[in-house]
Amino acid sequence: MLLCVLGLPAAAGAASIQEQMAQFPAVKTAIEELVTANHILYDQGAVDGYGHISVRNPANPDTFFLARSVAPSSVQVGDIIEFDLDGKALNGDARTPYGERFIHSSIYRNRPDVNSVVHGHAPAVLPFGLTGTPLKPVYHMGAFLGAGAPVFDISRFARPDPDTDMFVGNPVLGDALTQTLGQGHYVLMRGHGYVATADSIRKAVFRAVYAIQNAIIQTEAMKMGQPRYLTAGEAAKSQQTIEKTVNRPWELWRQRVGGP
Ligand code: MN
């Protein structure tokens, strides 16, 4: 605050979120989109009272923004907290954070290409983390699923007791989840939910929403017979084409929730 009064540029990360929003237009845009994304994900059924979305700080790759522990539909700019890549809140922010912020911090620490992370418990995708049936692209909108979503089984990483509360509540489990995600952009969590990642908020929201649609179609198709999935080549080519257009559904979804 003092630095601003003196007119000196504050180092990113050392300044409050309000100061960074005033100083860096990209931070202001990211925070405002993050709020809208919270509302969209709820409106689209990708999160409910639980679940969260974060964005890497465009002014400082070593921090990220994530709401305090509230339902996504109620998130406002004032609810956003800045964290370091160990999941520690910055700026002395002592408000209650999401217990699973380590999903976000570990992915940002290990995947420099990722700038946004979504986590939720959408019911349609859960069966694919339970049965060994892989969630695979059945149409072009799910092309980012590639060869199929990997499944993070928390019991394989919990020591010494494999029975956990199913909660990614520390950096060790966050790193294990990130390892299972690999270089992909979608991972199922056995008995829990999913994580979607992307290089932008809009694309991460796109993937969170269309993974659910893909799961619904795949489940219906499997009732009729063996689905014919997109080939690896089809998935790669259609992902290239469709993900250039993520602004179109974003605009539709944004209008529905009335965001800026
Ligand atoms: Mn969760």
Image: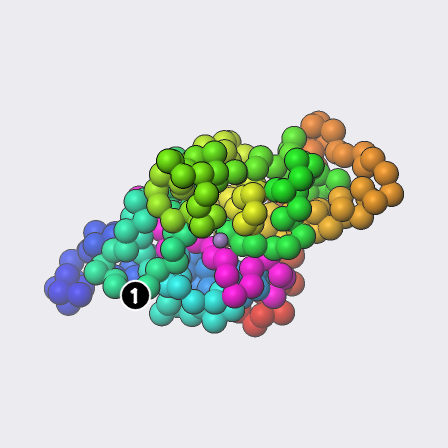
Image point (60%, 47%), residue name: 207
Choose top left, top right, bottom left or bottom right for residue 97.
bottom left
Q: Is residue 195 visible?
A: yes
Image point (51%, 51%), residue name: 119
Q: Vertical placement of 36 versus 229: above or below?
A: below
Range covered by the magenta-colored residues: 43-65
Q: Vertical placement of 72 versus 64: above or below?
A: below
Q: What quarter of the picture does the N terminus occupy?
A: bottom left
Which residue is farthest right?
A: 224
Q: Is residue 54 magenta?
A: yes
Q: Residues within 10 Å of mark 1 (few under 14, many from 20)?
A: few
> In the image, is 146 to the left or to the right of 111?
right
Image point (16%, 58%), residue name: 8
Provide the residue designation for mark 1.
95
Q: Is residue 21 visible?
A: no
Q: Is residue 31 magenta?
A: no
> In the image, is 196 to the left or to the right of 137?
left
Image point (67%, 39%), residue name: 131
For badge 1, the amino acid type reads Arg
In the rendered image, residue 14, in percent from the top left (x then y), is placed at 21, 54
